[in-house]
Structures are given as C-alpha cells and as structure tokens.
Amino acid sequence: MGARKRQAAEAIKEARKDIAIAKLNNCPTSPRKMRLMADMVRGMDVEKALFLLKHSGKEASNRLEKLLLSALNNWEQKNEGARMEEAGLFVKEIYVDSARMLKRIQPAPQGRAHRIRKRSNHVTVIVDARNKEAVVEETEEVVNEESNS
C-alpha cells in the first residue's frame, strides 16, 4: 500500500471512530415499505426513534428496531465508559438499498403466466453523538482510572 493510500485509510478510520454502523442484509421486505420507516426515524434522537419503532404497526418497524439496537450496542463497544444519555445519540444516516429479487410465476387466465417479483433490501444505520465533548471526557476518565489502578 502506498503512502497516500495509507494516509487516506487512516483518515477514514479516524473519522469513523465516533460513529457506529449496523447493517441488515437481505431483509425479505420490499425496499419501498422499509423506506417509509427509515424516513420516519432519520435524524431523530435514538430514544424517540426506538419509541416510534416499538409502537408502530408496520412489520418493517420490528426489523428496524432490532437494527437500531444493534447500532447502539456497537456504539457502546466503541466508546467504553461513555454513557448514551449524556452523549445525545441520534440517527445520523439511514438508507435502504434494494437487494436480490426472487422471481416467481403466478398462473393467469387462458394459460398465461404473470411474473411475481419478491423484493428484499439492505438497510444501513449510522448512529452518532451530538455531544462529542462529553464522550471524549468520559472515555479519558475511564482510561485514567484504569491506569491508576
């Protein structure tokens, strides 16, 4: 790997330290239905988004809720010792891409057949902290306590 490529890779790695990512691949729901829920929670605080997803009647909300909880867990793993409440976590990005499509045949009148496309999607959630100073201070305190022990 060249020097420029290594520096660019390190810069990307440093930028991604604060954020947590969770992905759900090949979810057997149509992307259009999943985007309705994704658009609803984009930019929201995590607590409010979880409440909305939990009390929504749509089937896609259950999967999105689990994915958001996974992203929160990933954030906790990256920022040991930091508290989510003080960090002010929010859904920075959420996007839904189409995935594989299962093609099936539906019998139709007069010997014809219609094609049925069973769609699926990929969902990516990125969670970030609004109060980055609080996260940095708390992680530094934990590091100092561990070194003193």
Image (cartoon, rainbow, N blue to C red):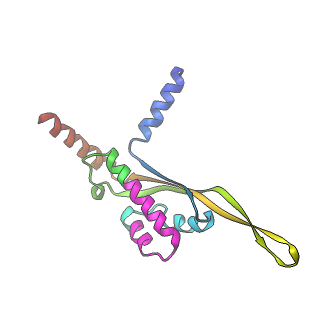
Whether residue 135 sits left or right of residue 74 in the image: it is: left
At 27% from the left and 56% from the top, the residue drawn is 86
Most distant residue in the right direction: 110
58 sits left or right of 128 in the view: right
Foreground residue, 23 or 136? Answer: 23
Give the residue drawn at x 48%, y 64%.
Answer: 63
Identified at 59% across, 58% down, the residue is 121
Give how far across and how far down residue 81 sits, in percent.
24, 47
Is 94 placed left or right of 83 in the picture? right
Image quadrant where one finds the C terminus: top left
Q: Between residue 80 and residue 100, name the one nearer to us.
A: 100
Image quadrant assignment for residue 88: bottom left
Up-down relation of residue 32 to residue 131 (above or below): below
Q: Main secondary structure of the magenta part?
A: helix
Q: Position of residue 7 (x, y in %)?
A: 48, 27
Q: Where does the image place residue 34, in percent across and percent down from the top left?
A: 56, 65
Does residue 137 belong to the magenta stretch?
A: no
User: Per the image, is 62 magenta?
Assistant: yes
51 on left or right of 114: left
- Identity of the residue furthest to the front in this view: 111
Instruction: Please report the bounds of the magenta region as a residue range.
Output: 49-72
- Quadrant hosting residue 17: top left
Residue in the image at 31% along x and 46% along y: 79
Residue 73 placement (x, y as % from top left): 35, 53
Q: How many marks?
A: 0
